[in-house]
Image (cartoon, rainbow, N blue to C red):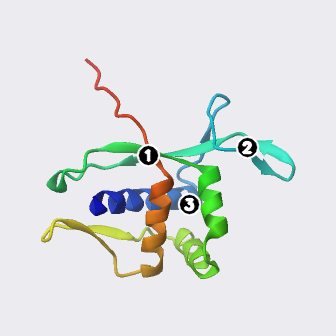
Amino acid sequence: MASLERWRAEHLAKYLWWVASGVKQWQSDRTSYAPEAEYRSGKPDLPAYLLVRVMELPAIAIPRHTLRLWRTDYKALLEQTDPAIKDEWAAFLHRSRWSSLWYYDSRNRVVRPGNEHRGLTEWTLELAALAEVLPAEKPAP
């Protein structure tokens, strides 16, 4: 089970890096439910979420699936995060190139932390725990 959480954490981190890089955006619609209203300068924002497509990893039986991370949950986690980790996360998000936090070790058939950013790996597991797993889509007939 640890490899599944780590694989999800890797994908969440990558999608958030893409948001910071301008490749992806938080999604919002008027019918979504978020845990609470989001406010910026007294004006409510629409609830927003990030859909994260987790690649399958057949060697260790991880199926392809989709996660949804609410922006309010992400911001709440950031607010309670240790300032040193928060600074490391901010620096990580502003890197010009992607650097994996977790990788698949094919020899031992497990997802392991990368050598860089050791302080972030445990924090990304907390992040992954906030994301909800969406029901699998049925293939078209």
Mark 3 nearby-residue class (10 Å; few <14, some 14–19, many ≥20)? some
Q: Where is residue 92 in the image (x, y as percent from the top left)?
A: 52, 73
Of callouts 2 and 3, which one flags the residue occurring earlier in the amino acid sequence? 3
When the figure is inspected, residue 106 is found, relative to residue 66, above or below; the finding is below
- Numbered mark located on residue 37 in the image: 2
Label 2–label 3 contact, CB within 8 A: no
Q: In which quarter of the image is the N terminus?
A: bottom left
Disc 1 residue type?
Answer: Leu
Which SS class for mark 2? loop
Disc 3 residue type?
Answer: Ser
Residue 64 falls in image quadrant: top left
Q: Which residue is drawn at 31% across and 50% down?
A: 55
In this figure, which residue is indicated by the disc labeled 3?
Answer: 21
In this figure, which residue is indicated by the disc labeled 1?
Answer: 67
Q: Which residue is drawn at 65% across and 59% down?
A: 76
When the figure is inspected, residue 48 is found, relative to residue 135, above or below; the finding is below
Q: Where is residue 77 in the image (x, y as percent from the top left)?
A: 60, 62
Count how many numbered circles sit on residues in the image: 3
Q: Which of marks 1 and 3 is in front?
A: 1
Q: Distance between the residues labelled 2 and 3?
A: 25 Å
Of callouts 2 and 1, which one flags the residue occurring earlier in the amino acid sequence? 2
